[in-house]
Every structure is written in C-alpha cells, then in structure tokens.
Image: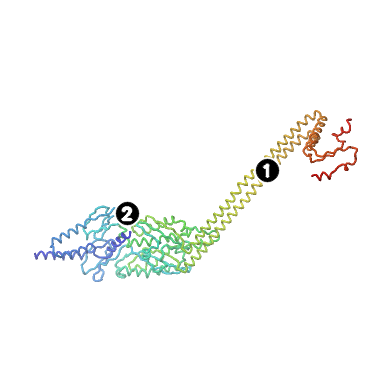
Amino acid sequence: MSWDWEKLKEQQQRKGGGGIPPQMSDLFEKFKQLKLPGGPLLILLIIILFFGSSTFFTVGVDEVGVVQRFGKFIRITQPGLNFKLPAGIEKATKVKVRRVYKEEFGFRSTREEARSRSRGGSETASVSLMLTGDLNVALVPWIVQYRIKDPYDFLFKVADVRRLLIDMSEAAMRLVVGDRSINEVISKREEIAIEARNVLQAEMDNAESGIHIVTIEMKKTNVPGPVQPSFNEVNQAIQEKEKMIYQALEDYNKEIPTARGEADRTVKIAEGYALDRVNRAKGDASRFVAVFKEYAKAKDVTRRRLYLEMVKDLFPKLGDKYIIDSNQQNLLPLLNLGKQIGVK
Amino acid sequence: MKSKGIVLIVAAVVIALVYFSAYIVDETEQVVVTQFGRVVGEPKQDSGLYFMIPFIQYPNRFPKNLQEWDGDPGQIPTLDKTYIWVDTFARWKIVDPVKFFQTVNNTISAQGRLDDIIDPAVRNLITENRLIEAVRQTNRSMDTFEHGVEDAKDQKSFQITIGREEITKRILKQAQPKLSKFGIEVVDVKIKRINYVEQVRNSVYGRMIAERRQIAEKFRSEGQGEARKILGDKEKELKQITSEAYRKAQTIKGKADAESTELYAEAYGIDPDFYSFIKTLEIYGEALGKDSSLVISTDSEFFKYLKGYAP
C-alpha cells in the first residue's frame, strides 16, 4: 500500500514541482552524454529508440492509464498495451482504480504518530480520543477502506488526496460521535460506521476527490483507561440486577406450583370427604328405612329381639359384671374398686 | 563535413529555442507569466502547451487544485469556561493567481497568511459559544442511562442552538473576506479534533466515574426492587392459592354435611323413637367393652327372669 502511495505522491510532486517534464530532462541528459564518439547515426538511433520506447505503455488489470498531452487531460485508457505520442508530448499516469486502500485511525502505530502534526504534544497524540454528545470522552478507533472511482478527479482536483481523506475521516467521525451519547458510541458502532461513511462520502464528493469510500469499519469503541472500571461496574450491576430478578423468579417458580398442587389436594380431600359423608348418610338412611319397615310390622317383638341381641353381643365383652338384687340398698361394700385400680 | 556540422548546430539551436520558449501547464496548475518580475498577459488557467519569449519571460506556476491548510491546535476557553484543544483544517484554492502572485507569491507563505487569519477566527467562534455547540451537530435525543431527575436536567444542557456545522460556517465567513485580497478562496473550514485539556480531562474522568457509579447503583437497587416485588407477588399468590383452596374445601364439605343431614333427618324422621332406640343399642355395642364394669340391678329387663319367671 505504502509503495503505491509513494509512487502516486512522487507523480504528483513531479507535476507540481519541476517546470520541465522529467522525460524531457532525461532526454537532455542523454543528449549530452552522447556527444561522445559514435557519430550522428548512433545518436539518431538512440533518439529513435527512446521516442519509440515511450510510445507504448502497459496498463495493469487493476489500473487505468490517464493520458495528458502537454499537461492537458486527453483520455483514459483501459488495461492492456496502449499507445501514445512520444515522451514530451503525451504523458501517461497509471491509477489503480480497482485496488482498495486502507487507512487506520486510533491505532497507536509509530507511523501514525510521526505523521500527525502533534504540536500540542500528548494532547493531540491520540486520534481516537473524542468528545461525545453528552460531553464524555470516548476512544473510537476505526478503519476506512476506499478506492479511486474517478482517476481524473483523483489526480487533478485535490493536492493531497490522502491527507484530505485522513483529516476528513477524523472530522466526519467526530461529527457523528459528537451527536451521540457515550452509551450509543459503545453499543451502536454499526450505526455510527454507516453514518460516518455517508458523511465522509458526501465530503469527498464535495471536494471532487474521486474517492469512493468502500466502508468504514469500527474497531472496539471504549472509554479511556481510568474510566473503564466504572463502566465495567455498570455492566456488572446490570448483570447483578438480572441475577437478582432471576433468583426471585426461581423462588417464585419453586413455591407457586407446589402451592397450587397442594391447593388442588385440599380441594380433592374435601370432595372425598363430601362423597364419603353423603354416601354414608345414604347408606345409613336406607339401612334405617329398611329396618324400620320390618320393625313397623311387629314393633314390640322386634324391639325385644333387638335389645336381647345387643345384650348377647355386649355381655361377653364386658369386664366385671355385678348383678345386684333390686332389694339391696347399698351396693358399695361389695365393690372392691381399689383392687381394680391396683391391677391396672 | 563542415557544412554538415553547421547544419547540425543550427538545428540544435533552433530546437533549444523552441524548447525553451514552450511551457506546459498541467491540469493541476495555473501559470502567471512575468517579464522581469512584471505580470504579462492573462493568467493561463487552462492546461496545455503555451509559448513565451525564452529567457526574458518566466512562467510562475501555482496550484489550481484544492489545497489543504492544517490549523495550529491551540488551547481555547469556551463560553462555559472549559479549556479545550481545537484542531481545525481548511481547504482552499487560488482563484486569482495574479493577486496571489503579487501578494503572497507561494503556497508556503500562503499557509502563514491562512494561519494568521483562520486561527483567530476559530478562537473567536469557540470562545463565543458553549462547548456543546462545537461538539454536537443536531438535537437528536440521545440514549443515556439517566432517567427521572437526571434526565430532564442533562438532556436540556445538551441542547444546542447553532451546532458544529454552523460554527465552522461562521469561521469561514469571518475569514473569507480577509483572504479574498490574496486571491485565495477558502472552500470550507472543518473542526478535526476537539478535546479537553489535560487538567480538565482528569476532572471529566472523575465526573464520568461518579456518573457511572450512580448508574450502577441504580441498576442494583432496581434489581433489588424487582426481586422484592416478585417475592411479594409470590407471597400474595401463595396466600391466595391456599385460602381459595380452603374456601372451596369448606364449601364442599358444608354442602356434603348439609346433604347428609337432610338425608338423615328424612330417614330418621319416620320414627324418632325407634331411631334413638336402635342407635343407642348400636352405641352400647361400640362404647362398652372389657374395660367397662357393669353394675346392674335385677330390676332390669334382662335380669328380671333371674329372680323369677313371672312376667
């Protein structure tokens, strides 16, 4: 990349600087040297060779050639072998239109440092340090990828396209970041990249730089070092908040379904009780009715029978039985109640 | 042989003359031709091949394309007394090469003139405005964490009335008239960088940290609040569930009790006396056992035959 830039710069300097086109001066050099033996024929031959060799040039697949005749732009040639008038009349400059160039911002490489006119010392050293719309400080590194879309504009309209691009990128990025809060700068990088690209493209078009911005890619945006722990703290707090909520929900989910099941159980038990109660009542009732029907037929005898049956069932089960003559008035002397208790 | 040499020399001289009298104006250039320092003719602004009188006239070349000027980043206080570093750049071009040639002469001294004129304009405009005006461009509402009290206060102080673009336009407006006499047109002025100066930056960091802490606390207490709300909901729901179940159960039981009562009443109502007789017998059987002692008189129905058989 840098190789190409140097070459382009050189070409531009050549155009702006020396009054005499370089090929012309080369020719003169040769002229002087060839005043040596060999005769006019040799001189002629060399001149022909020189002019001949400058009438064609090769344009690579990723470039186009821009041809100027006496400095005036004439045509753009496509890749392949191209012909032109000899040196001194027409000049061809190759421009790599299909190549994507890249500029990095906010990476503290030494090249970056040397290039920036940091007259304010450390104050301006960091490209990525910028103010956000809520007057906080953010670190925003980014990459701009671009290519040359109009070789004519690129070569002739702006003195130093690369520098323009670099400065304009910074201005555009700061314009976009300046309108966003620190939160947005950190979380909405994509949006910022798109908008910065649009702003930058508009400016580059405005300047007729012939540059097409392919993309702006945001690197990880952050806050300056001393502030980072407090930002992490906020993230942690957000996590903690969610954790607390989840824990509460966990508690909720642990108890509520159980309680619902328990409630269902209570209701079912009640229902069982009801069934039991009603069925028993029905059973008892029908039994009573049935017994009563028979009883009604022979009341006295049934009563006696039932009584005697009871006595028959009950008597053998009973413990101590004391039968006292109805004439006996005091029964206490006969009962040995103390002994009974002692046995127990 | 000799005549051939003369021809050759003459040809060479002619070629040299033609060569020295011709000059090329590149696409990126414009030329002012001078004769012993005096401007001759119109400036050549179109590219191409031109001729002049060699050795007497001289083509002074000036760039025609867009030039860049990089401002001197300086410490400037804003209207709200915050010291900031402002780095600006501008794009300019030579629109009147004759004027330019007469007053400035070359691009390096032009940079100096631009320094003298644009830098003060930048200072003026920055000092006249609040910091936020130079930072922001629009009044779009920003996503900050603050809500409630903070919100109203902060968002208002971030409102702008003119904005960055307008500031740069005003800088341009101040600077341009002074540069016209140099044949220079400034296309635009841009603010490249604005940063707090070192001391201010540290206090800004302090503020940012405090602000974040407060936000973090807010999140934590929000979390606690939410959690408690959920727990409260849980308690409430538990009570609701159990009490509802109790209510349902009691209702069901009551209904069943009522039904059974009705059933019993209906059945036993036929002959209450018989019911009490039969039930009492039944209860004797259940309630009395071998732990019970019975003292019974021969008067009783059961033992009346023990004393005699007469009815």
In the foreground, B130 or A182: A182
Other-residue count near label 1 (Cα within 10 Å), few / some / many at <14 / 14–19 / ≥20: many
Question: Among all residues in the image, which is located at the extreme bottom?
Answer: B36
- Residue shown at 63% from the left, 50% from the top: B236
Is mark 2 in CB contact (under 8 Å) with mark 1?
A: no
Instruction: Give left or right: position of B138 versus A244.
Output: left
Q: Amino acid at mark 1?
A: Ala
Quadrant of image for the N terminus of chain A? bottom left
Instruction: Give left or right: position of B40 versus A280.
Output: left
Residue B67, located in which quarter of the rendered image? bottom left
Q: Amino acid at mark 2?
A: Arg
Residue B272, located in which quarter of the rendered image? top right
Same chain assignment for discs 2 and 1: no
Residue that badge 2 annotates: A98
Colouring scheme, one of rainbow, by chain, secondary structure, one colour: rainbow
Residue A303, located in which quarter of the rendered image? top right
Chain designation of label 1: B
Question: Among all residues in the image, which is located at the extreme top?
Answer: A297
Chain designation of label 2: A
In the foreground, A99 or A301: A301
Secondary-structure class at tag 1: helix
Residue that badge 1 annotates: B249
